[in-house]
Image (cartoon, rainbow, N blue to C red):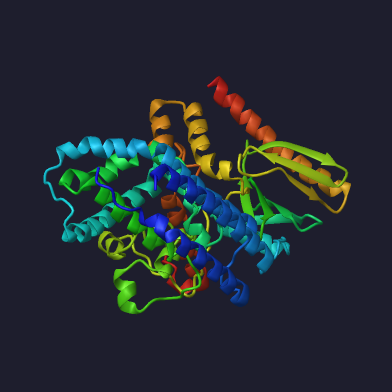
Amino acid sequence: MNELPNPIYFAIPAFIALIIAEMIHARSTRRVNYEPSDTAASLIMGLGNTVSGVVLGFIAIGWFVYIERFAVFDIGFVWWAFILAFVLDDFVYYWSHRFAHTVRWWWADHVVHHSSQHYNLSTALRQPWLSPLTLKFIFFGSWLVLIGFPPAMVAFVGALNLVYQFWIHTEAVGRMPSWFEAVMNTPSHHRVHHATNPRYLDRNYAGVFIVWDRMFGTFEPERDDEPCRYGIVKNLGTRNPLKICLHEWLGIINDVRNAKSWREALGYWLGPPGWSPDGSRLSSKLIKQRWAEQQSRREVGENPATQPAE
Amino acid sequence: MDSALVQILVLIISALAIAGLVWLNARLGGWTPARVESLAAARAVLEFDVIGFRAAQGVLAADGRAALFTEDGGERLGLVTALGDGLVSRALGAGDVRAVDRDGAGLKLALNDYTYPAVTLTLADEDEAESWRRAIEALTAAGARQNAVEASA
């Protein structure tokens, strides 16, 4: 396989410098929150992710090398192919990310990234350790290789995508110019994605271009009257990296083991996060539904004139 | 340079950078260890986190590290605890509490939740602690009954 540099390695010094700058900004303005135990957990998760990439990366690499022979075209390393691959990879990222939020098997991996109640640049590095084992790369990583983009190019543009996403994990930047907010993923859009406010749940899946969310109906703008509350629906009471890494996997194992039928087991494994056969737990969809009901009750309570006549 | 060597170097530098950043974060300060300031603040967190949960009667631990609530119109209990500079909450239903122990005015709760460490609340007096212990015990008993029914089904 043709070798291309890993942009993430080159970006690490910039990541560190920007985190230091944001910490100083946090201290002087109080607009951003950093807390050492949370920062340590996020950064250790990031380091573990790098280690797992080295240790388990061969699984994905082996797969891409294998399927390369079935590619429809032989695109090669031409300049325009990098641009096209970058855009297509971001499109695939949108769907991969959307499924990571709606299929528990993949959520068990991705939940790690959302598990901090803080939202700062260190949160960007809070990444899972077991991603290759979820086999998500087979479902979402294969397309570009099968079209004919070289696997090294696909890996390269995928890494560029992740480098772009680093800077949007901040509260230090308010809103970018409107033309930029319209096309690109920005700190404002991504704050919404990390928020647990029911209005914001499961929105703004974009990596680089927010246009995918606008196209597929998952876009939600950040509102000044509704500050983001970060984390997950059931926030973790621990900063232990191992527990952060494994908690949802253990939850799946536990639920599947106690399932009363194959259908239930399948639901716990591949259903949306929070799914339960009797609806006693809350998926994002149910939370949004209950919140909407609550809101309409509140509106009726505030304005009895809108109550329907019986 | 050999790519394995580069990777090892990156890992070592990253580990050092992490230690440095956490140290800097601790030195710079700027955060306040969380406290459950009031029952109203705890109620607001709980009702935001657990959609549909309406807190009724509540009690605040003397050290401000936790609060417990009964549910208005429901059988669950609400728990709010301090972690770092934030608060974490849970609605506790049947089967969610593994054990509850009282020692004088102190109440220790262990949950069936891998990510939630045991919580100790020091309440105003023994009577108050005992009444909450009974409420929690009733919840665990309901959980045990539910498990027994499911096992026999």
Residue farthest to the top, as pictured: B152
At which x and y percent is residue B122? 82, 50
Front-lying residue, A136 or B103: A136
Q: Is residue A175 above or below residue A39?
A: below
Q: Image quarter for residue A85?
A: bottom left
Front-lying residue, A238 or A29: A29
Front-lying residue, B144 or A230: A230
Q: Is residue A128 visible?
A: no
Left or right relative to A203: residue B24: right
What residue is drawn where x is 57% and y is 42%? A243
Q: How many marks?
A: 0
Figure quadrant of the C terminus of chain A: bottom left
At which x and y percent is residue A279? 46, 42
Front-lying residue, A131 or B4: B4
Left or right relative to A239: residue A58: left
What residue is drawn where x is 25% and y is 42%? A1
Q: Is residue A246 above or below residue B9?
A: above
Q: Image quarter for residue A168?
A: bottom left
At which x and y percent is residue A255? 50, 33
What residue is drawn where x is 30% and y is 61%? A213
What residue is drawn where x is 62% and y is 42%? B93
Q: Is residue A289 above or below residue A297?
A: above
At which x and y percent is residue A90? 28, 57
